[in-house]
Image (cartoon, coloured by chain):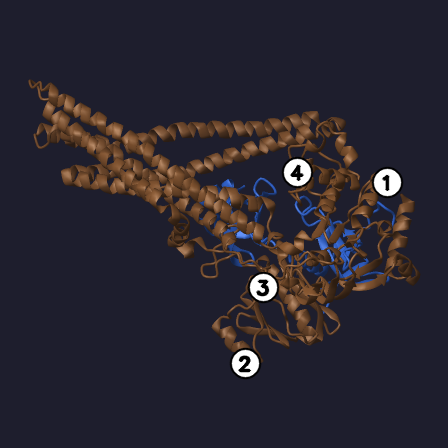
Chain colours: A brown, B blue
Amino acid sequence: MKLLYELPDEVDCLIKQIIKTRPVLYCVPADLDYSGTYIDGWLVITSFHMVYVVNGRLIEQISISEGKDYKSSVMVGNGMLEGTINGSAKLIVRYTMEHAERYTHIAAALNQLSVAKEPAVKSLEYDNRCPECNRMYPAGTRACPACSGTLFVFKRLFSIVKPHGILLIAAIILFWAVTGIQLFIPYLYRRFIDDCLIPGRTDVLLIVVYVGGIAACNLLIMFISIIRDRFMIKAGNRISRDLRHMVYEKIQMLSLSYLDNKKTGELMNRVTGDTERIRNFIQTQSVMTINQVFSLIGISIVLFLSNWRLAILILIPAPFVLFLSTSLRHRIRRMYHQQWRSMDKTNSLLRDILSGIRVVKAFGQEQKEVNRFKTASRELTDITIRNEKAWNTIFPSLGFIMGLGNFLLLYFGSNMVLDQQMKVGELIQFTQYAGMVYGPLNWMGFIPRWLAEAFTSTERVFQIIQEKIDIKDKNDAVISKINGRISFKNVTFGYRNYEPVLKDITIDINPGEMIGLVGRSGAGKSTLINLIMRLYDVDDGNLTIDGVDIKDMSQDDLRTQIGVVLQETFLFSGTILENIKYSKPAATFDDVIRAAKIANAHNFILNFPYGYDTKVGEKGLTLSGGERQRIAIARAILHDPRILILDEATASLDTETEQQIQEALGRLIEGRTTIAIAHRLSTLKNAGRLFVIEQGGLAESGTHEELLKKKGIYYDLIMAQRQMARLR
Amino acid sequence: MEEGSIRFIDPKTAIFGRTEGGFLKLHIEPDEDYSRVSLHYIFPFTAGNGYVSVRNYDSKEIGIIRSMDCFSETAKELLREELQRRYFTPVIQRIVSIKEEFGYFYWEVITDAGSKKFTLRREHHSIISITEKRILIIDVDGNRFEISDCSKMEPKFVKVLEMLL
């Protein structure tokens, strides 16, 4: 996201006069004045000052160090930058929502500058508009469809199409063959009529030759079309397969920090929807377009060569028809959009009332709801009738208008025949060609929309394929067996570079030790764990395992030796057996049973009719939270990790289940370095040491008893929880 | 204050003013002082300019203004200004053009706050009808615009509005 705009010349001159040599660090629009009028305003920031300029005039200059607590406050439809300047709150500038996110960065930078720090604020977000033409990028892309242009799409598509080029070229050649034959058939008709259908002449052989020729041409078209379509289907599906693989493989390789910003549905859509749209574009739309363009050129050449006057007659209504069909298409789209909306409204009303029928009855509102539904339903009926009527009028009319050229052709053509300037067969040939002109013309109306769709899909897919992998293994990554000593040395980390979540953390964890992480939600406990798993890289400081920097270790190697039991245990669709074996596919039945027994899962699994072969997940049996967790523990036991991470592993369970899980966990953690996060502090009693994390820093550490004696944050948390428990 | 009871701000005892930094302050006689307050519509669509919640800096409600009419002209002006600041919704006086390109509608309009270009997504609930004629438009960035009477716009734009509604 742009934080350093280029200033208009006159503003730039003014700024140079005011701030002389200081480099401008940030410069953003402040496009709303205090009274709510759009203005050409700018906020310019150097290391010491911020300058507010409106319409080329200096409004205010503020020394940054005289202020603190700079903040971007978003209100409804606009936002403002405020700060405490010389002790009192001040509204600095106002802006429209287009710049709202920009100002969160600006406020962060001002806060750093106010304490005389070099600002490290960089925006990782992207602008959603093209800097050249200010058009919006299509959702999920970073390329402007207007500025990058059609060539850009084809260049990108070319790289995917290349390996399957032969198939596509073959398909296109076969297309041309079909077009050629199609163009030849009217000629045969003409010769047939002119040579055979002469009164008084009965040459049966000639009739057989011509009729046979026409039939043979049609047969040939059929065969070539079948082969051509097979080529196209093969090429298209291979291309979409390649794309799907490329996208999916890349998603698996990308770090969580990238994936965190994307919704699952959006990613799924890219793997399936967008690749499918690209396939359709390559396989059908673009190939057909090439073909239609060539048919049109071919037909036009033939028409003009045979009789240019008649050719003009056929083509006269073409622009008119094209214009009419395009504008009608727009109108029809609008009509059906309205109908769809009305339908949607009626359906959601129905859904709403049916699911809330108890409330309706309880408050005696039946009649009101009946009336409401009747109104919506009546509106839908009216719109539908109106649309159907229009549809039934428009289409036959369009057909008639498209045939107008034919009437002209017939009229003038028959006159020419009667004047003996033309033969009957020639006229028939012409009418057949005339019928072939409008197909391609109609087709072309759709091209812009297809191109736009293909552009967006291609962009979305390529954006993932070309994404840089931010957590990479070094070439000389160490592969080693982990012993389990974890050391944080002055580690600082933030998901955004100017908002550290963990600050200067120094911790040593011994092999085989169990550590409990305690703190309020949002304190940074889960972040600490994410770093150990190297889902993110630290910004500052060192994180070592057995003395080796985690950045020097191979990620695969590291993660195969770390086991995780999460609060929300995710089971994949499949059997219980498959889910337990997920971490170690080579495990034997004996291994699985042993792991399940240690995890206190064996008994409940056997209560299911299909035992370990019971299907779970999306289409299978729904397991309770406690059951899922015990399966996850069995999975972790089988995995036999050196480092174990338990994240809220015993939240929200009944006492008996919790006891069983505690027992299972007790067995699991034996001999492993374990780091556990739990809100319920009683579950951390077994921990060797507890680390209390407060606002991203290590606030207290020690055993349960030591911390209680200290009467600090941990003591307060324990007391607060006891009180809550008593209240319940 | 009792749960469920409403404290209405009394125009006779409440004195609104501006701080030097540009924020709204409130003094309620005899001795209640708020160095910075904000105003929130309680029923933004249904109650017009009535029912405004006055809140302190920590967003706790101090009281409710039932109707602004009972306040002095100066106070009314201050309140109106503050509400316009919080709910910045320029009223569209004329639509200059609406262009559809690549799934977005690009609008160029003249509003009571000046001329403005903004963008709407095609398949999105970006227009809310408040009454039969009055609509609220929310653009891709979250800017808001109001059209007080749709039927007064040019017919070709009314068609586009109908489709987007």
Q: Against A100, is B125 above or below? A: above
Residue A622 found in image quarter: top right
The mark nearer the N terminus, 2 or 4, is: 2
Q: Against A98, is A182 above or below? A: above
Three-letter residue code for mark 3:
Asp
Residue at numbered disc 3: A476
Along the horizontal axis of the image, is A600 left or right of A159?
right
The mark nearer the N terminus, 1 or 2, is: 2
Percent of width and height locating residue A27: 56, 69
Q: Are marks 1 and 2 in contact (CB under 8 Å)?
A: no
Percent of width and height locating residue A245: 50, 46
Numbered badge on residue A578:
4
Q: Quadrant of the C terminus of chain A?
A: top right
Q: CA distance from mark 4 to mark 1?
A: 29 Å
Percent of width and height locating residue B123: 52, 43
Residue at numbered disc 1: A655
Q: Are marks 2 and 3 in contact (CB under 8 Å)?
A: no
Along the horizontal axis of the image, is A202 left or right of B64?
left
Residue density around tag 2, few if under 14, some if 14–19, many if 20 or more, within 10 Å: few
Q: Chain of mark 2?
A: A
Kindly state the secondary structure of the residue where label 4 is placed: helix
Three-letter residue code for mark 2:
Gln
The mark nearer the N terminus, 2 or 3, is: 2
Disc nearest the viewer among 3 and 1:
3
Q: CA distance from mark 1 to mark 2?
A: 73 Å
Residue at numbered disc 2: A17
Q: Chain of mark 3?
A: A
Q: Are marks 2 and 4 in contact (CB under 8 Å)?
A: no
